[in-house]
Amino acid sequence: MRSSMIRRGVWAVGVAVLVLALAVAALPLIASTRIVRDRIAWELSAWSGFRVTIDGSPRIEVWPKFQAILSDVTLSQWTETDAPPVIVADRVEVDLSAMAALRGDVAFSTARLVRPTIRVERTASGFYLPPLPSGGRIARSIDTARVVVGANPQKPDLGKLPSDPFGVVEFRDGRVITSAGGKDTEILSSLSGQVNWAAMNSDASLTATGIWRGESVQVDFSSARPLVLFAGGGAPVTLSFKAAPATFSFDGVASMSDNAYFDGQAKFAAPSLRRVLEWSQAGIAPGAAIGSVSVSSKVTASAGRAKFENTTVALDNNPGMGALDFSFAEARPVIAGTLAFDTLDLRSFLSAFTPIAPTGQAGPGEIDTSFADRINLDLRLSAAHATAGPVQLADVAATAQVKNGLAVFDISDASAFGGNVQSSLRFDRKPEGTQVEMRLLASDVDTGAFATAAGMTRLVPAGTGTVSVILKGPGKAWDSIFENADGSFSATFGPGSLNGLNLPAFLKHNEQGGFFALDDVADGSLPIDGAEIKASISKGVARLDKAEVNSQKYKIWLSGIASYTGRGLALSGGIVPTGQPPAQPQANGQTANPPPQAPNQSLFFVGGNWSSPFISPISRGVSGQ
């Protein structure tokens, strides 16, 4: 009896195994006959909301997993039959449920798109997104969630959210295109990644890599309540973007409603802002931009406006703090705010917003003022220490403004050369061309150090003085500014010394006649009581209206012209005992009505250039003792 039961059990197990084997062996046949191409297409359409067509015949594989391999798959909008497909894939692999297949149903949880082409459109917000489906489980779930969110936007009832399954969507070796001027333009290539979203009411994540504008990029996105986010409610969001030129991350709360907003912590870093501007094609003078930059800030953004609070900025490893306000409501984006630095390179900082000559470029170049068409700027800057080229500044208060074709940078207050410095640089775009205006006022400064920084090392009084420079001219190119500038120069000097002048040797050489170089009499120093210079500048050439140096025994005067760009000199001058009025030389070298009671004046011409001037006597004087 017991043996009979064993035999019946073995037969039962054998029959079950045989049935299972036959079922597995029959799956491809069943799939090819019952899970037909139209059935798969219908299920994919119901799942995605797009009209799905499959040109190739499905191929069913059982091992190592039960899946359908579809070829030449397109997803299109139901309502726009003439529009190009939203997605075209060379192949789609769908993991199927074997039990559902035996029942004649299609059930899948994973879809892999191989070599897909995704078409996107530029939205009103400026983002590129694919057209949204007009139906399907995803759209219906979002519509249901929108009702839930609308009932209580602050705390929606998550238990009422749809729980329809979504699954996993993988994509490999895809690309993203858009239409521009009637032609398709590739935005992204080598696109690979996956979306993980088990059910509509669960969390979701996206990971994608690709090549954008020649650089490999990686995007990671996740949300604990993605359905609430897509329905217009607020939901936690984390986003990161990584590429060689720049990285960006956001962690906070976001909403995609009509009144979209972001609220959270954002970070941005780039090893070279110049490279970022070139890569992003922002059109803001990339050749002049600063080096590394990093920003960390609390961000609140809504309705075309973003506020950056408790902002930490590092420019070329120079840290600063402040607050910024971005507005996108106008035709041009507006950036306003305040930033405070411990140390700051003013030249490199401003080059990102104004057409400052690029650091490190050999020679002057064209001035790019196109930035004024793309941005409005109003920044207040302060720095405990700053550099402007070779000039060291302290306690700097400055402003940078760009608006309606006008760019202005002002240093309203700064300490330098032992005194106070104020300066202004102004670019004004006009129909006839860009006009550039430069102003500098250096008060109570060390004139020797100031002259060295300005590149003037010859016969500049050393002491304390005040210098004022005003230049204005066309700004097509940097060299044209100085070649065509008009303006004025004035300087007053207090007691000090005129270094590089051996006055007795100068008088002796001048008395002997013949040319001699200033270097021949540069081994001395003349104590002075003060000096004054006034000059009018026209087309880059300074005409001395007044140039006098007063010492205890002598007065030295000069008149004539000096070229700033060519650095050439054409001056006449004289040395007269103190208290005696000078006689001005004529063009032929003779004095004009010299005072008979004061013949002890030594007259001369100064020629050559700033670096190597030479002296030519034009009258025979009596040297002083």
Image: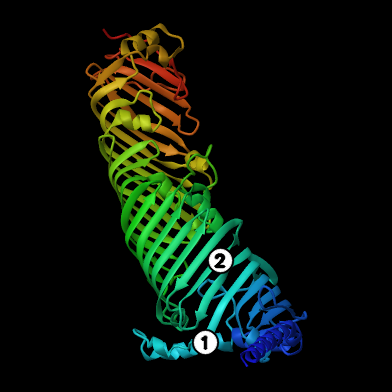
Q: Secondary structure at mark 2?
A: strand
The residue sitting at 43% across, 8% down in the picture is 513
Q: Is residue 342 visible?
A: yes
Q: What residue type is disc 1 on?
A: Asp
The quadrant of the image that shows the N terminus is bottom right
Q: Nearer the viewer, residue 350 or 72?
A: 72
Residue matched to label 1: 164
Q: Nearer the viewer, residue 370 or 395?
A: 395
Q: Earlier in the sequence, mark 1 or mark 2?
A: 1
Q: What number is the disc on residue 208? A: 2
Q: Position of residue 470 (x, y in %)?
A: 38, 42
- Circle 2 packing at 10 Å, graded few (<14), some (14-19), many (20+), is some
Q: Nearer the viewer, residue 450 or 151?
A: 151
Q: What number is the disc on residue 51? A: none
Q: Quadrant of residue 521?
A: top left
The reply, left or right, for residue 574 in relation to residue 285 is: left
Distance in Å between CA atoms under marks 1 and 2: 24 Å
The reply, left or right, for residue 199 in relation to residue 462 is: right
The reply, left or right, for residue 71 in relation to residue 603 is: right
Q: Is residue 78 visible?
A: no
The reply, left or right, for residue 86 in relation to residue 288 is: right
Q: Position of residue 403 (x, y in %)?
A: 42, 61
The residue sitting at 26% across, 30% down in the picture is 493
Q: What residue type is disc 2 on?
A: Ala
